[in-house]
Amino acid sequence: MLTLTDNAVVAIRDLMVGEDVPADAGLRIAPKADEAGTLEVSLASTPHAGDQVVEKEDVRVFVAEDAVPILDDKSLDAQPGTPGHPTFRLDRRAQA
């Protein structure tokens, strides 16, 4: 299952501030329809049917069903960018 770093939690929380989204909204990761092998992130009010929900602290990430196998061994990290525009990165988790 996808994990979230502390930096990702902060970045997602910052994206939600000032947005007109419900309290249980989250960041959704899904394959980009017109670009094979590319993922896109967006804010979503609720998970779509079949989405895997990843929660850490007070943030939620919805992983599209067809992206779950791709992200299963990954960790979502973020680096601050311009306000409201962090840069997200996927890293392979170290195997225990």
Image (tube, rainbow, N blue to C red):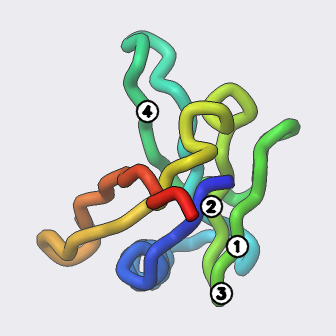
Image quadrant containing the C terminus: bottom right
User: Measuring 50% from the left and 51% from the top, which residue is drawn there?
Assistant: 74
Circle 1 residue: 55
Q: CA separation, marks 4 and 3?
A: 23 Å
Label 1 or label 4, whichever comes before in sequence order: 4
Q: CA separation, marks 4 and 2?
A: 14 Å
**Circle 2: element type:** strand
Labelled pair 2, 3 in contact (Cβ < 8 Å): no
Place of residue 36 in the rendered image (x, y in percent of width and height, measured from the top left) = 42, 11
Mark 3 belongs to which amino acid?
Asp
Q: CA separation, marks 2 and 3?
A: 10 Å
Circle 4 residue: 39
- Residue neighbourhood size for the residue with mark 2, other residues' Cα within 10 Å, grouped as few (<14), some (14–19), many (≥20): many
Q: Nearer the viewer, residue 29 or 92?
A: 92
Q: CA separation, marks 1 and 4?
A: 19 Å
Residue farthest to the bottom? 57
Residue 91 visible in the current orientation: yes
Circle 3 residue: 58
Mark 1 belongs to which amino acid?
Glu
Label 1 or label 2, whichever comes before in sequence order: 1
Labelled pair 1, 2 in contact (Cβ < 8 Å): yes
- Residue neighbourhood size for the residue with mark 4, other residues' Cα within 10 Å, grouped as few (<14), some (14–19), many (≥20): some
Above or below — where is 60 with respect to 36?
below
Place of residue 30 in the rendered image (x, y in percent of width and height, measured from the top left) = 56, 35
Residue farthest to the front? 96
Question: Would residue 66 appear left or right of 81 to someone viewing this image?
Answer: right
Labelled pair 4, 3 in contact (Cβ < 8 Å): no
Circle 2 residue: 61
Q: CA separation, marks 1 and 2?
A: 6 Å
Label 4 or label 3, whichever comes before in sequence order: 4
